[in-house]
Amino acid sequence: MPALPLFPTTLVGSFPQPEWLIDRAKLAGRFPPRVRAAELWRPAPEHLARAQDDATLLAIRAQEDAGLDILTDGEIRRESYSNRFATMLGGLDVDNPGVFVERVASRISRRASSGRSGAKVRSRRATSSSSATVASFRDFV
């Protein structure tokens, strides 16, 4: 392998996926996907792996043409920054994700602590204008 220059060039982040590979309108509608999102891919499932391989080769060639020193696969196969990792984990049912159910019917506020410091701040999770008392480290020692 040839030696790299003092300041090698490379691609940071994902290479743009070609329009023929991914449906950008659907991607924008569920951004960022947290579970497997097969409906985002334009090729039929039986042709998807080959299409992703082709798009990866195009990304590598574009990087070569640009003169980059360190090439990447462009992360062509991932739908988002998190779900490629999450869908590769075992033991998770990514095809049947859970649904978040809002259980709060009215505005609530929460007290962060009943500590002695007495500092008043608004809780980020509170949905009312009430303040919460914040404990200091001294309250626990």
Image (tube, grey):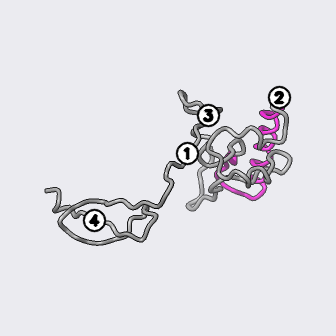
Q: Which of marks 4 and 3 is in front?
A: 4
Q: Nearer the viewer, mark 2 or mark 3?
A: 3
Residue under circle 2?
46
Few, some or many residues within 10 Å of mark 2 (<14, 14–19, 20+): few
Q: In this view, does 44 lie to the left or right of 126?
A: right
**Foreground of the two, 70 or 105:** 105
Q: Where is residue 89 in the image (x, y as percent from the top left)?
A: 55, 32
Residue under circle 3?
94
Q: Which tag, 4 or 2, sits closer to the chain's start? A: 2
Task: Using the numbered discs, state the Cα–Cα distance from disc 4 to disc 1 in whole angstroms.
Answer: 29 Å
Q: Where is residue 131 in the image (x, y as percent from the top left)?
A: 35, 69
Seen at 73% across and 53% down, the residue is 29
The verdict on residue 70 being magenta is: yes
Task: Using the numbered discs, state the Cα–Cα distance from disc 1 to disc 3 in whole angstroms.
Answer: 18 Å
Q: Which of marks 1 and 3 is in front?
A: 1
Residue under circle 1?
101
Which three-letter amino acid code belongs to the residue tagged 4? Val
* Residue at the limit of the structure toward the left, as seen here: 141
Task: Using the numbered discs, state the Cα–Cα distance from disc 2 to disc 3 in whole angstroms.
Answer: 20 Å
Q: Nearer the viewer, mark 1 or mark 2?
A: 1
Q: Nearer the viewer, mark 4 or mark 1?
A: 1
**Foreground of the two, 43 or 26:** 26
Residue 126 image-quadrant placement: bottom left
Task: Using the numbered discs, state the Cα–Cα distance from disc 1 to disc 2 in whole angstroms.
Answer: 35 Å
Mark 1 in CB contact with mark 3 (< 8 angstroms):
no
